[in-house]
Image (cartoon, grey):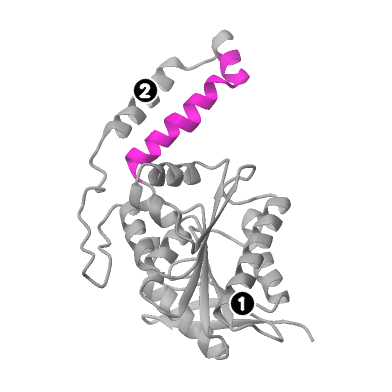
Amino acid sequence: MMNREIPIIFQCHQDNLLGIIHQPVCASKLAVLFVVGGPQYRVGSHRQFVLLARMLAAHNIPVMRFDYRGMGDSEGEPRSFTSIDDDIAAAIAAFYQVCPEISGIVIWGLCDAASAALFYAYQDERVQGLVLLNPWVYTEQGAATVYLKHYYLQRLSNPDFWRKIFSLKFDYLASLSSFVTITCKMLNKSTGAGHSVDKTVDKVDPNLSLPVRMKECMRRFKYPVLLILSGKDLTADEFKDAVATDAEWQGLLADGRVSRYDFTESDHTFSSSLWQDQVADWTLGWLNDLNQKLQ
């Protein structure tokens, strides 16, 4: 018997959202919800969501892919990843309705979808795991610091950079202007990171800077987390820099419930088939371990 792919339409605040459920014949109790990050289509590097969903379903893990409001095939006005809690909740409710046998959800997200998953997960006891790939923790200062460290310094060791200089094809004024602008952003301390966190309230303040908001959501989420970070990606570099200088973040990532893979060869979207297969293997192995722990 073949696994089924079931198209569904469900509502979130009067808007129709579209999704696909990959339902195995012999399904595990633990299921995976994919949250998409940023405007995208389903070919090229992002074809991995379809391929990964089918691979997991072939290993008896139910999967749901969906577009939140304003994204892809779903209705509604475009919205930021910082405010899609209701969309995720509606998707989980629809998933349970079609597959009532499941007893727990793992949310899988890349980039800003990883951040959105973390914002939501601590609020819903049905979410029993997270797979976070290259989480988006953007601040102007953080991005500028990473750009200086990982772009400008790398250019100094690039032969093409020096060939442009010696051939007089280098635009000194534009490069100097860009360097000054980025340096000013790096030195600017007004990123919102200084906002205090009230740990007694039920919901994390959405006005916190991304690194601080994500850290507090991570602290409140009590289930296992799989973290995968690329080696050739400025988004992953910014996340690494943000947590490297924060003792609380370091403590959270050192917790036994967090599994981490640093994928030094890969880019932001794991765009080669080899890299996608490796991410799929790590995801499946981690899900199988989690399934055994929850039984």
- Asked whether residue 238 is drawn in magenta, I would say no
What kind of residue is marked 2?
Ser
- Asked whether residue 161 is drawn in magenta, I would say yes
Name the residue nearer the viewer: 239 or 77: 239
Name the residue nearer the viewer: 186 or 291: 291
Provide the residue span drawn in magenta: 139-164
Quickly name the residue at label 1. 292
Against 100, residue 154 (above or below) is above
Kindly state the secondary structure of the residue where label 1 is placed: helix
Task: Please report the residue visible at 48 percent of the width from the left and 26 percent of the height from the top.
Answer: 152
Q: Is residue 138 toward the left or the right of residue 226 in the image?
A: left
Against 104, residue 153 (above or below) is above
Kindly state the secondary structure of the residue where label 2 is placed: helix
Query: Quick check: can you spot residue 35?
Result: no
Task: Please report the residue visible at 59 percent of the width from the left and 60 percent of the height from the top.
Answer: 41
Q: Residues within 10 Å of mark 2 (few under 14, many from 20)?
A: few
Task: Please report the residue visible at 56 percent of the width from the left and 89 percent of the height from the top.
Answer: 98
Q: Mark on residue 222?
A: none
Q: Residues within 10 Å of mark 1 (few under 14, many from 20)?
A: few
**Which quadrant: the N terminus?**
bottom right
Query: Quick check: can you spot residue 89?
Result: yes
Quickly name the residue at label 2. 177
Q: Is residue 61 toward the left or the right of residue 247 in the image?
A: right
- Residue 132 percent across, percent down from the top left: 51, 59
Foreground tag (1 vs 2): 1
- Residue 243 percent across, percent down from the top left: 40, 47
Quadrant assignment, res 278: bottom right
1 or 2: tag closer to the N-terminus:
2
Q: CA distance from mark 1 to mark 2?
A: 56 Å
**Which quadrant: the C terminus?**
bottom right
